[in-house]
Image (cartoon, grey):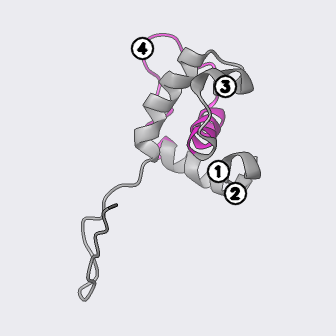
């Protein structure tokens, strides 16, 4: 798991806990997810870390490429970093843009 996703089992557990608090595992209308929240989180982490296509990721996790894409679309925004609203009093933010 570590080399493939960059997550230790402990970090994955913390990440899944945060996702559950955000409602990622809530019961929704329609067909239920075929993978557990842990496996869906690993799929998204593997997608971001390895840059594999959905066609390659799907079979690794036992789902179709379409399901892998839906999982990434659903969980990706929840895993993205949230912008900071406040900084320490004497902090000077530096913005860098690529040339």
Residue shown at 27% from the left, 76% from the top: 93
In the picture of the structure, the residue carrying the numbered disc 1 is 13
Considering only order in the chain, which callout, 2 or 3, is on the residue closer to the N terminus?
A: 2
Considering only order in the chain, which callout, 4 or 2, is on the residue closer to the N terminus?
A: 2
Residue 47 in magenta stretch: yes
Q: CA distance from mark 1 to mark 3?
A: 25 Å
> Of helix, strand and loop, which one carries label 4?
loop
- Extreme residue toward the front, this view: 99
Q: Is residue 75 above or below residue 71?
A: below
Q: CA distance from mark 3 to mark 4?
A: 28 Å
In the picture of the structure, the residue carrying the numbered disc 2 is 10
Q: Is residue 19 above or below residue 89?
A: above
Within-10-Å neighbours for mark 1: few <14, some 14–19, many 20+: few
In the picture of the structure, the residue carrying the numbered disc 3 is 56
Q: CA distance from mark 2 to mark 1?
A: 5 Å
- The magenta stretch spans which residues? 20-48
Within-10-Å neighbours for mark 3: few <14, some 14–19, many 20+: some
Residue shown at 56% from the left, 43% from the top: 48
> Of helix, strand and loop, which one carries label 1?
helix
Within-10-Å neighbours for mark 4: few <14, some 14–19, many 20+: few
């Amino acid at each position: 798991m570590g080399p493939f996703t960059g997550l230790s089992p402990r970090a994955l557990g913390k990440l899944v806990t945060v996702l559950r608090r955000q409602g990622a595992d809530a019961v929704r209308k329609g067909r239920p997810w075929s993978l557990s929240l842990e496996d869906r989180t690993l799929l998204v982490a593997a997608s971001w870390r390895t840059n594999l296509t959905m066609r390659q990721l799907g079979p690794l996790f036992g789902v179709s490429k379409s399901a892998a894409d839906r999982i990434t679309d659903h969980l990706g925004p929840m895993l993205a970093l949230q912008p900071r609203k406040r900084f320490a009093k004497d902090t000077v933010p530096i913005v860098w843009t690529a040339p």
